[in-house]
Image: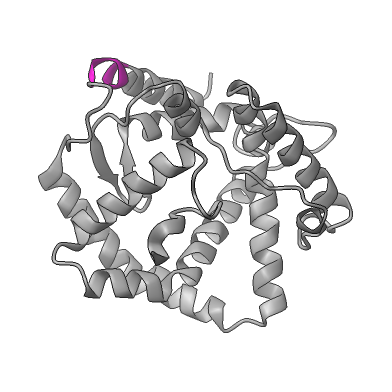
Amino acid sequence: MTLNKISSLGLAIFFSYILIITPAKATTECFEPVSRTIFKFNMAFDDVVLEPIAKGYNKLPNIIKVGTSNFTSNIATLLSIPNSLLQGNISQVGHATGSVLVNTTLGILGFFNPAERLGLKAYKEDVGQTLGYYGVGHGCYFVLPILGPTTVRDSFGLIADTFIDPFAHITIREHELMGISGNDLDYFSVKGTSAIDFRADNIKNIESLEKNSIDFYSSLKSVYLQDRENKIKNSSSTEDDWGNLDN
């Protein structure tokens, strides 16, 4: 067993333990002073690295931006297939599977989105949402370095995602699927590009939220928790991450 697999197993056991002992409906904070310190670090990282890259990304021709966003979104939809199945939502399984197949083929590896014009919705479901669907509460809230806001449930889900996500299987899990394989660089490049795409789409929204918030940390916490609840209930007006940032 590799060090990477041992670490993942250890973290999964740790979060499983916390998930069990944490009250189901709690949204209190486990380590608020530490989380606020990490939040300040994340904001400094955003100011120095992420935001400048996002602004540069926004200067790219629109066809490149849209194509890149479509490509990363298509890969992210792969995770929806097993999670929709676990939730017993066959309709979502069909939509997600159809969307991936159509966009990967007719859409040239997902750079175009003909599936949308065919009425296929690229649902975004993850293990955290699946756990929430079955009544598992947030657990306490905290902030991770670089990755940002999360909860006990969603942190456990983040690890579990890498075990059922087909894209993770052919990259960081080093498995081959239908003759296709990749590596760690492929996985983290796509995840990093997704983060940049999200940041680029929300530059004005985040600036507005920060400017109008008495406590920016608490405001982002509220937005994150509300967005996760909306996604569990499938009541978000958009399938994008933190879709209510512009509300």
Using the image as rendered, state which of residue 208 and residue 152 is in the foreground: 208
Image spot of residue 224 (x, y percent) = 34, 49
Image spot of residue 185 (x, y percent) = 60, 50
Using the image as rendered, state which of residue 191 and residue 136 is in the foreground: 136
How many numbered callouts?
Answer: 0
Residue found at the far right of this picture: 106
Q: Quadrant of residue 155?
A: top left
Q: Is residue 222 above or below residue 11?
A: below
Q: Quadrant of residue 229?
A: top left
Task: Specify whether residue 19 is painted magenta.
Answer: yes
Q: What residue lies at 77% left-to-right and 59% top-to-bottom?
A: 113
Q: What residue lies at 29% left-to-right and 15% top-to-bottom?
A: 20
* The C terminus lies in quadrant: bottom left
Q: What residue lies at 41% left-to-right and 58% top-to-bottom?
A: 244
Q: Viewed as shown, does residue 29 lie left or right of 148?
A: left
Image spot of residue 146 (x, y percent) = 35, 53
Task: Specify whether residue 241 is painted magenta.
Answer: no
Instruction: Look at the image and tell me whether residue 4 can be seen.
Output: no
> Magenta segment, principal secondary structure?
helix
Instruction: Look at the image and tell me whether residue 2 can be seen.
Output: yes
What's drawn in magenta, residue-wise? 17-22
Using the image as rendered, state which of residue 77 and residue 52 is in the foreground: 77
Image spot of residue 151 (x, y percent) = 31, 36
